[in-house]
C-alpha cells in the first residue's frame, strides 16, 4: 500500500494583509543578508549573479484561490511586499533576467481577484512582477526549485488559464524523482514502478494552456496492479482524497510518461470503464458511468434567481436552457440489444443524445431576471455563464451628414407657321373672322376648285409656360404669313444639407430619416355600392419618402467599428388616373469597417436624366444649325447627387468579456 512520498521542499511565506503603506520585504530563507529586516530596500540587497532567468508566467484559477506560477530555470532570491493604496502585490526575483517577451499583456480576466499582471526587468538582475487585485486579499508565497508560486485566496469562476513564456528545460531540473515507497500490494502479481514528479511544464514551447492541465506531472508504470493501489498512488502523489465505490475493482496495467496526474488518472479510469467526479467539498469520487449518471439524476433540484443588468432575460434564457443538466439514465447500444456490460465486464454505454432536460429556465421581462432550476452542482456554472454574457454593451454615436443636390435644366424653342388667304385658310393657329367681325369656330375654309395654297406647321406643338412669345406677320403677295416664336430656359436647384446624430448601443439599429410621409388612398373596389347603401371602402396608407438611413454598428475587439448601412432615397411622382402615384427609389446596402472617429463616405447615388423631344417639319427639322427653326425642340436635364458621410464614435467602451463582472 502506498504510504507516502517525498515532495520538493518549499518555503511558505506567512499571509500578509494589506497595510496603509508598503510593507517591508520579508526574507524567504534564513540566509543572512537576503532579508530586509535591517531596513534596507529590495534594491539594496546583495544581488545574486544573474545566471538564472524567468522563463514563464502563469495564472491558474481554482475554486477558492488563484496561483500565480513564475517559472525560473536557476537559483534566485525572492522578495515580496504590498502596496495597500493600490491593492498591489509586488514580487522581486533577484538574480534573474527576463526571459519572456514583455510586450504580451495580461488578458484582464478576473481570476480570484487578480485583474492585471505586469512584469519587467526592474533592475539589471531583478525581475519584478506586479499583481493588481480588486481588493485586499491574503496571499502566500511558496518557493519551489523551478517555480515561485504566489497563492491568492478568493473565489474564482471557472475561467481559462493564462500563460506566457516557454516551458522549463528538463536539463535544469535536479532531483526530478519524488519517490513513492510501497510496502504491500493487493495483488501478489502486481508490479508498480516508482512514480516521478515531472516539471509542471514540459520541454516543448508552450502551445495552448487552455487545453493542458497545470497539475504536477507523473511518470509511473503498473503491471497487473489492483485499481485500489493505483488510486492510492494518485492520492498520495496529489495530496487529494480519492474514494472508490464498491463497484470499482479489477487489475490495471498502464505506463504513464510525463503526464499531469489528473489527466493520467482519468485516462486510466476511462480505459477500464470508470470515471471520476469531484464533489463540492473537493473529494474525488470514482464510480462506474452508470452509477455516476444515476447519482446526478437522483440529486435534488434547486432554484436560483439571477437578475440581469444589460442583456435581455428572454434572450439569455434560450442559451442557458441548452446547458441544463439532462436525465441520461436510459442507456442504448445502437445496432444491438441493451446491455449493461461488455464482454470484458466493463459497462458499455452510450448516452441518448435526446436526453430530457431535468431543470427549467424561466425569464421575467418585468424584472429582467432568470429563474434557473437545476442540480446544485450545475447552478454555479449556469450563473457564471449567464453573467458572462450580461455585459454592458458599447455605445456608439452616429453622426451623419446628408448632402442632396437636385439640379433640373429645361430648354425649349418652337416655331409655328400659318399661311393662308381670305378665301382659304386653316383656323388652328390664327383665328379668322367673318365679314361681320364674328370669330369663326370652324376648323378652316377651303375653296373647292380654287387655285389657292394654304398651310400651317407645328399647330399643336407648344412650349409650356414659355418665357418668350413672339409673333411676326407679313403679306406675301395675296397670302398672309404669320410666325409664332416660343422660347423657354429654366434652371431649378435644390440643395439639402442635414446633419442628424444619434447614439445607439452595440449591434442595435439607428434609424435616421429626412423626408415626407405621403398618404396614399386605397379604394377596395370589391366592396362597391349595393342596394343596401354600402359604398366602396377607402383606406389610407402612409408611404415614407425622402432619405432613410439605417446604421447598425458593431464594435470589434480591437476597437474598430463595423457598420451595416442601408441608405434609401425615394420620391413621389403623381401620374394621375387609376395609377395614382409612383415612388422612384434608390438604395444602397453596404457593410464597412472604420476606425473610431473615422468617416465613411456612402456614394453611388448619383442619377442624371436627359430627355429630348423634337417635333416639326420632316427633313427640315433635321437640318444642321437651322433645323430648330422648323419645329419645336424641348430638352430637359435632371441631375441628382446624394452624398452621405457617416462618422461613428465610441462614447462608451462597455464591459468586455475579459473585464471583471460586477454583481
Image (cartoon, rainbow, N blue to C red):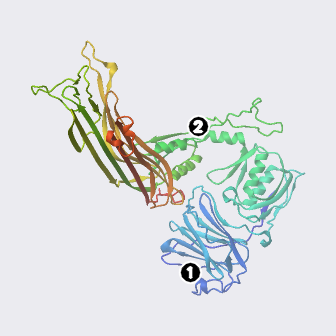
Point out the frontmost of discs 1 and 2.
2
Residue at 27% across, 45% down: 488
Q: Is residue 230 left or right of residue 595?
A: right
Real-space Cα separation, disc 1 to disc 2, in angstroms:
56 Å
Q: List the residue tagged with mark 1.
A: 24
Q: Is residue 467 left or right of residue 542?
A: left
Residue 359: image location, x then y, percent: 55, 39
Q: Which mark is residue 357?
A: 2
In the rendered image, the vertical position of residue 327 relative to residue 239, given as above or below: above
Name the foreground residue: 317 vs 61.
317
Element at badge 1? loop
Residue at 43% across, 59% down: 649
Task: Find residue 616 and report its image quarter.
Answer: top left
> Between disc 1 and disc 2, whose residue precedes?
1
Residue at 48% across, 76% down: 20
Residue 312: image location, x then y, percent: 45, 46
Element at badge 2? loop
Amino acid at each position: 500500500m502506498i504510504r507516502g512520498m517525498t515532495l520538493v521542499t518549499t518555503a511558505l511565506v506567512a499571509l500578509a494583509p494589506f497595510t496603509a503603506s508598503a510593507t517591508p520585504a520579508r526574507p524567504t530563507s534564513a540566509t543572512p543578508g537576503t532579508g530586509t529586516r535591517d531596513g534596507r530596500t529590495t534594491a539594496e540587497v546583495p544581488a545574486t549573479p544573474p545566471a538564472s532567468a524567468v522563463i514563464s508566467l502563469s495564472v491558474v484559477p481554482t475554486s477558492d484561490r488563484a496561483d500565480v506560477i513564475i517559472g525560473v530555470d536557476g537559483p534566485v532570491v525572492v522578495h515580496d511586499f504590498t502596496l495597500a493604496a493600490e491593492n498591489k502585490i509586488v514580487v522581486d526575483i533577484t538574480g534573474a533576467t527576463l526571459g519572456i517577451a514583455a510586450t504580451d499583456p495580461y488578458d484582464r480576466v478576473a481570476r480570484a481577484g487578480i485583474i492585471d499582471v505586469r512584469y519587467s526587468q526592474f533592475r539589471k538582475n531583478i525581475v519584478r512582477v506586479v499583481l493588481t487585485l480588486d481588493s485586499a486579499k491574503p496571499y502566500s508565497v511558496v518557493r519551489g526549485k523551478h517555480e515561485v508560486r504566489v497563492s491568492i485566496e478568493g473565489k474564482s469562476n471557472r475561467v481559462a488559464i493564462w500563460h506566457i513564456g516557454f516551458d522549463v528545460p528538463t536539463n535544469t531540473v535536479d532531483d526530478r524523482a519524488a519517490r513513492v515507497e510501497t510496502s504491500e500490494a493487493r495483488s501478489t502479481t502486481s508490479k508498480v514502478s516508482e512514480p516521478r514528479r515531472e516539471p509542471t511544464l514540459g520541454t516543448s514551447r508552450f502551445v495552448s494552456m487552455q487545453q493542458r492541465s497545470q497539475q504536477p506531472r507523473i511518470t509511473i508504470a503498473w503491471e497487473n496492479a489492483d485499481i485500489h493501489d493505483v488510486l492510492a498512488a494518485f492520492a498520495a502523489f496529489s495530496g487529494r482524497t480519492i474514494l472508490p465505490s464498491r463497484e470499482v475493482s479489477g487489475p490495471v496495467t498502464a505506463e504513464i510518461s510525463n503526464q499531469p496526474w489528473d489527466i493520467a488518472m482519468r485516462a486510466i479510469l476511462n480505459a477500464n470503464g470508470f470515471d471520476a467526479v469531484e464533489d463540492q467539498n473537493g473529494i474525488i469520487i470514482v464510480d462506474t458511468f452508470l452509477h455516476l449518471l444515476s447519482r446526478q439524476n437522483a440529486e435534488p433540484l434547486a432554484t436560483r434567481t439571477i437578475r440581469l443588468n444589460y442583456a435581455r432575460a428572454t434572450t439569455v434564457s434560450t442559451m442557458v436552457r441548452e446547458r441544463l443538466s439532462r436525465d441520461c439514465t436510459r442507456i442504448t447500444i445502437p445496432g444491438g440489444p441493451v446491455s449493461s456490460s461488455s464482454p470484458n465486464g466493463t459497462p458499455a454505454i452510450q448516452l441518448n443524445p435526446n436526453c430530457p432536460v431535468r431543470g427549467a429556465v424561466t425569464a421575467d421581462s418585468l424584472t429582467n431576471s432568470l429563474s434557473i432550476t437545476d442540480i446544485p452542482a450545475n447552478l454555479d456554472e449556469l450563473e457564471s455563464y449567464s453573467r458572462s454574457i450580461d455585459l454592458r454593451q458599447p455605445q456608439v454615436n452616429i453622426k451623419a451628414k446628408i448632402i442632396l443636390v437636385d439640379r433640373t435644366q429645361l430648354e425649349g424653342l418652337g416655331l409655328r407657321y400659318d399661311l393662308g388667304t381670305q378665301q382659304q385658310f386653316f383656323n388652328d393657329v390664327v383665328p379668322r373672322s367673318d365679314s361681320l367681325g364674328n370669330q369663326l369656330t370652324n376648323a378652316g375654309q377651303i375653296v373647292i376648285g380654287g387655285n389657292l395654297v394654304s398651310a400651317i406647321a407645328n399647330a399643336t406643338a407648344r412650349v409650356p409656360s414659355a418665357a418668350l412669345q413672339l409673333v411676326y406677320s407679313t403679306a406675301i403677295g395675296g397670302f398672309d404669313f404669320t410666325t409664332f416664336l416660343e422660347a423657354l430656359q429654366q434652371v431649378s436647384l435644390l440643395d439639402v444639407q442635414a446633419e442628424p446624430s444619434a447614439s445607439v448601443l452595440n449591434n442595435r439599429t439607428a434609424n435616421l430619416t429626412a423626408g415626407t410621409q405621403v398618404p396614399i388612398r386605397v379604394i377596395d373596389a370589391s366592396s362597391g355600392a349595393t342596394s343596401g347603401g354600402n359604398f366602396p371602402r377607402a383606406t389610407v396608407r402612409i408611404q415614407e419618402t425622402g432619405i432613410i438611413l439605417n446604421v447598425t454598428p458593431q464594435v470589434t475587439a480591437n476597437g474598430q467599428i463595423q457598420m451595416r448601412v442601408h441608405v434609401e432615397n425615394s420620391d413621389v411622382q403623381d401620374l394621375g388616373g387609376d395609377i395614382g402615384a409612383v415612388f422612384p427609389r434608390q438604395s444602397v446596402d453596404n457593410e464597412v469597417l472604420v476606425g473610431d472617429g473615422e468617416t465613411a463616405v456612402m456614394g453611388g447615388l448619383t442619377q442624371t436624366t436627359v430627355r429630348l423631344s423634337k417635333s416639326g417639319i420632316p427633313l427640315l427639322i433635321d437640318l444642321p444649325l437651322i433645323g430648330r427653326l422648323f419645329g419645336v425642340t424641348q430638352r430637359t436635364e435632371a441631375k441628382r447627387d446624394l452624398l452621405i458621410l457617416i462618422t461613428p464614435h465610441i462614447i462608451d467602451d462597455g464591459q468586455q468579456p475579459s473585464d471583471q463582472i460586477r454583481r
